[in-house]
Amino acid sequence: MALNKQALLGAYRKMAEIRAFEDRLHEENATGDIPGFIHLYSGQEAIAVGVCENLRDTDHIGSTHRGHGHCIAKGCDIHGMMAEIFGKEDGLCRGKGGSMHIADLSVGMLGANAIVGGAPSLAIGAALSSKTLGTGGVAASFTGDGGSNQGTVFEAMNMAVVLQLPIVFAIENNGFGEATGTDYAVGAPDIAARAASFGMPGVSVDGTDFFEVHEAARQAVERARDGGGPTAIEARAHRWFGHFEGDAQLYRTPEQVAELRRTKDPLLNFRAKVDSRKASAKELDSIEEEARLRVDDAVAKARAAAYPEVENLLTDVYVSY
């Protein structure tokens, strides 16, 4: 399905924001001013954006510990995100969640998740709610290749089929579950093939190709919204940084990473395939520069923002009925 110019430029804007956001965090983390762990999404931008561009603001997603890309793709404010990562009161979760727990229900972001394979069981709850209330909503969950081996993921997939829930299971296969290669840890020839055993369609796509991901997600979302039930999408891509910031990456060489950056860049792939009459190189360059400036502004404001007051330590923790 052909995308118009506005849609193409909007998708590239989100991919460029993710890249600029993550590249800057890679630098900022080295200063020691960011509390907690950071897991960067660079190299996988086309997956989050390819899926989320098919979703409405009222649809929901469940994320992973590598969630910055999902947040931006779903519409989270990058200023609120950056403040959250710096642990500031202006953050989306008032500085209490940090990098691995960013959530914003106003845009359907159920939250990044430090539980491996935790998103599918949350997302099917949103999908069940949509089906029960008849809202026409769709949910999507993101899970890594390592997380795809978790029993909770299998249970969620089975329940989604049994109840015919409107959900898309996006499996991001970046080649490593932390430091363990997919070819060792995953017994099936491909992760998408598992979907058939649960009774749902599954497809494997190039996760560095926005257009391929977008089309697979479009079909899956339409099927879900029309009452056709769940779909699994395995998107193969490559993370450019370590599992976490500080990972020595002894499982691969710098030369291998350099080759991935040269040949498997989602932004360069987009530029190579996009119709230049709809998105010129000049327009795309401008979008990248604007993204860098927005991220610069977000960092400056996050650094200047106040930390939460000590007396607010236990607020937003317990629910009062």
Image (cartoon, rainbow, N blue to C red):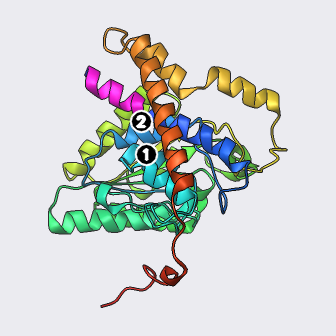
Q: Specify whether 198 is left or right of 245.
A: left
| Residue occupying the far top of the picture | 277
Q: Secondary structure at mark 1?
A: helix
The residue identified by callout 2 is: 14
**In this figure, which residue is indicated by the disc labeled 1?**
72
Tell me if label 2 and label 1 are in contact, CB under 8 Å.
yes
The image quadrant that residue 35 belongs to is bottom right
Magenta residue span: 5-13
Tell me the kind of residue under disc 2: Lys
* 117, 268: nearer the viewer: 268
Image location of residue 135, percent across then percent down = 16, 60
- Give the x, y percent position of residue 266: 53, 28
- Residue 182 rendering spot, x and y as whole percentages: 68, 46
User: Where does the C terminus fall, quadrant-wise?
Assistant: bottom left
Above or below, 77 against 321 in this view is above
Mark yes or no: residue 1 visible.
no
What secondary structure is the magenta-colored segment mainly?
helix
Give me the C-alpha separation between circle 2 and circle 1.
7 Å
Would you place residue 123 above or below residue 295 in this image? below
| Residue drawn at x 40%, y 36% as measured from the top left | 50
Residue 88 drawn above or below residue 174: below
Residue 31 seen in the figure: yes
